[in-house]
Image (cartoon, helix red, strand yellow):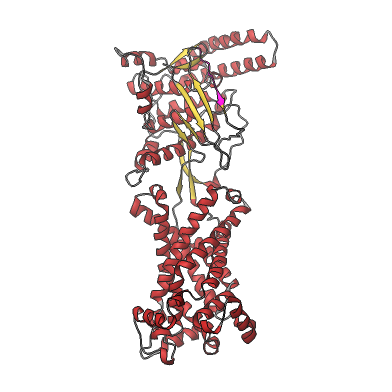
């Protein structure tokens, strides 16, 4: 009965308020009237929720992590856009009242390991605020109903309100009143509805501020809000002025939008001041024409909002790792197959430097003397070896990044500020694992290229058996005689490769090169960054590569002992290095550097290119391994 009476009174109030505007018969006023009727009609349906809200053991607001590719972009044609001051203040409220978000805020974002904890916490708040802002899209209807701001208010009450008689609930409702007073009057829930929500707040407010002067110091106010989780103190209250609510005492509610990527340092500043007449004054100043969108990073009085929501790394399950291994193995095998001729020339320049003048001379002589077959020597060992390399190095790199981040920095989020260190260590660790399987196959490849008459007819298995049987102490360990220099080469090469690739790609994206890496440009960017990484890593690891080739071909009596007067028992790496320097000099450590840089730039660019293609085809691309934090107020 009370609901029916309330419905009648409110409907008459809304109708009488709007009918005056209808006298002008304008389309705008007719729409206003319709909006008032619809809003008023929904109020009594929601009133039963207000007086006695039961405690929520598990708040019904939905929080979840979803992969980027499983999220969808809203196509809402709504007319309400929530300002940044609203979404950031709502984020503060959730940090204080939602135990799950509070846990994420205080436990999942450790700052002890970061060099700039304030900046790091501000970044995480901006991403969390963006997740909250995305969740507000479902409440953007300006016509009332289930998708309106008043429905959002009801959802928040159901999730976090307990009992009107409890001081904690009055405090929560005071905060809700402040929150919705931050909206423009035309976007606020109907004033009669807010009256019901806030009916017990004034008495609580007066008792909390008894004997206090209701003023604020702007200096202390700004300093207080350096802690992003703090809410407005009890001297602030939402007060009804006419048909809407305003914040009292009034304070400058400012927002500063950051320029989009690639634009000049333009700024757009909007200042909205809550006044006694419930009007919002907005002043926009721009130094040039600038376009902003919903993904615009913005800073406000209550904190920043990022252009992207909160994310975390997807757990690397055996299924994901197996797909990464397949993509890496296939990509490496294909790229190394294409550059086998260049690899042959590089190896000949290292094993017989006096026989050739330069890269082109070596390629020409090999082709003239041995034909096309001479340029494909060691193909079987090359394909098998680098298929293993791709299978082992790429999934282990992804796995080690997370492990190292957790061990050294506590979480991937903190480790993000130590990216170069993580990339170096993870790349080195992945290279160690890859070297264990690559060493025997690399020895077989080098034998087939340096002495094709002896080893080519034997094939990979025959060459490995021949190497194991050589020397005065035959055995399987001979196959790993070149492991120390190979591991040194691969550790230097792998760590620099991943470090350079990540660094160059980050710089290219930040600079807006290749269309910021979108669509087909993303693959072009991947190839270019991989090429640069290949050149840098080959230059750093060239001395170790020359020493490996020297050992594998029988030099220094170590490894593989290829017969002749060079192979006179197993020698340590120090002896081999001394003998190499005596024979070739320091310059010999860089024999074939030009061809290796060309080889490495092409092959590493191709590796990363095909790896990205295949992992995306298998559904384990970079975006698929990122989960987005979703906040849904339902």
Residue 559 appearing in the image: no
Residue at 44% across, 92% down: 564
Return the x and y of residue 404 as percentages of the image width and height: 37, 56
Can you say whether 203 is above or below 472 in the image? Answer: above
Residues 202 and 185: in front is: 185
Return the x and y of residue 311 as percentages of the image width and height: 46, 45
Residue at 40% across, 28% down: 160
Q: Residue furthest left?
A: 211
User: Residue 272 magenta-drawn?
Assistant: no
Residue 290 appearing in the image: yes
Residue 368 left/right relative to 120:
right
Magenta residues, dominant SS class:
loop
Residue 535 left/right relative to 220:
right
Residue at 39% across, 30% down: 56
Total marks drawn?
Answer: 0
Can you say whether 345 is above or below 314 in the image? Answer: below
Return the x and y of residue 602 as percentages of the image width and height: 57, 66
Query: On the image, which quarter does residue 158 sit in?
Result: top left
Can you say whether 482 is above or below 517 in the image? Answer: below
Residues 441 and 375: in front is: 375
Task: Provide the residue span drawn in magenta.
Answer: 277-284
User: Residue 282 magenta-drawn?
Assistant: yes
Residue 547 left/right relative to 138:
left
Residues 30 and 151: in front is: 30
Return the x and y of residue 116 as percentages of the image width and height: 37, 43
């Amino acid at each position: 009965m009370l609901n029916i009476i309330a419905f009648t009174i409110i409907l008459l109030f809304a109708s009488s308020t709007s009918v005056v505007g209808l006298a002008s018969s304008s389309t705008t006023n007719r729409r206003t009237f319709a909006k008032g009727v619809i809003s008023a009609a929904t109020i009594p349906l929601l009133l039963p929720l207000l007086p006695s809200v039961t405690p929520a053991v598990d708040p019904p607001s939905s929080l979840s992590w979803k992969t980027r590719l499983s999220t969808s972009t809203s196509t809402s044609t709504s007319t309400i856009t929530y300002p940044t001051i609203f979404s950031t203040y709502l984020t503060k409220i959730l940090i204080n009242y939602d135990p799950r978000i509070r846990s994420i805020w205080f436990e999942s974002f450790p700052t002890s390991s970061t060099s700039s904890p304030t900046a790091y916490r501000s970044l995480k708040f901006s991403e969390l605020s963006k997740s909250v802002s995305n969740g507000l899209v479902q409440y953007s209807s300006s016509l009332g109903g289930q998708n309106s701001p008043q429905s959002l208010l009801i959802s928040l009450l159901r999730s976090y309100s307990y009992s009107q008689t409890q001081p904690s609930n009055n405090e929560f409702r005071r905060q809700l009143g402040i929150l919705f007073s931050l909206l423009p009057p035309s976007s606020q829930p109907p004033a009669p509805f807010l009256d019901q929500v806030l009916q017990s707040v004034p008495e609580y407010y007066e008792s909390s501020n008894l004997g206090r002067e209701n003023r604020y110091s702007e200096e202390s106010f700004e300093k207080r809000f350096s802690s992003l989780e703090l809410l407005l103190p009890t001297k602030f209250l939402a007060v009804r002025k006419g048909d809407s609510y305003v914040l009292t005492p009034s304070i400058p509610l400012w927002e500063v939008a950051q320029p989009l990527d690639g634009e000049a340092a333009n700024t757009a500043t909007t200042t909205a001041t809550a006044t006694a007449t419930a009007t919002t004054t907005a002043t926009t100043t721009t130094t040039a024409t600038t376009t902003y969108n919903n993904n615009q990073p913005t800073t406000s009085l209550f904190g920043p909002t990022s252009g992207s929501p909160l994310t975390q790394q997807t757990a690397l399950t055996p299924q994901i790792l197996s797909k990464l291994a397949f993509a890496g193995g296939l990509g490496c095998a294909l790229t190394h197959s294409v550059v086998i001729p260049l690899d042959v020339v590089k190896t000949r320049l290292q094993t017989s430097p006096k026989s050739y003048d330069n890269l082109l001379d070596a390629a020409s002589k090999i082709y003239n003397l041995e034909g096309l077959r001479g340029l494909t020597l060691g193909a079987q060992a090359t394909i098998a070896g680098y298929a293993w390399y791709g299978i082992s190095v790429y999934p282990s790199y992804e796995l080690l990044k997370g492990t190292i981040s957790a061990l050294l920095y506590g979480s991937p989020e903190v480790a993000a500020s130590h990216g170069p260190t993580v990339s170096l260590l993870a790349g080195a660790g992945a290279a160690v694992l890859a070297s264990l399987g690559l060493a025997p196959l690399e020895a077989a490849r080098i034998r087939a290229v340096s002495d094709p008459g002896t080893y080519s007819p034997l094939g990979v298995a025959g060459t490995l058996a021949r190497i194991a049987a050589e020397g005065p102490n035959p055995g399987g360990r001979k196959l790993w005689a070149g492991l120390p220099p190979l591991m040194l080469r691969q550790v230097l090469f792998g760590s620099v490769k991943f470090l350079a690739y990540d660094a160059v790609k980050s710089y290219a994206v930040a600079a807006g090169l290749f269309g910021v890496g979108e669509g087909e440009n993303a693959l072009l960017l991947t190839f270019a960054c991989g090429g640069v990484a290949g050149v840098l890593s080959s230059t750093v690891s060239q001395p170790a590569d020359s020493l490996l080739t020297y050992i594998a071909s029988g030099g220094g009596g170590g490894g593989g002992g290829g017969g002749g007067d060079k192979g006179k028992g197993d020698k340590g790496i120090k002896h081999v290095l001394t003998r190499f320097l005596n024979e070739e000099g320091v310059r010999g450590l860089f024999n074939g550097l030009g061809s290796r840089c060309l080889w490495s730039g092409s092959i590493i660019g191709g590796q990363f290119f095909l790896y990205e293609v295949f992992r995306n085809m298998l559904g384990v691309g970079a975006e698929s391994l990122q989960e987005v934090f979703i906040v849904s107020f339902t």
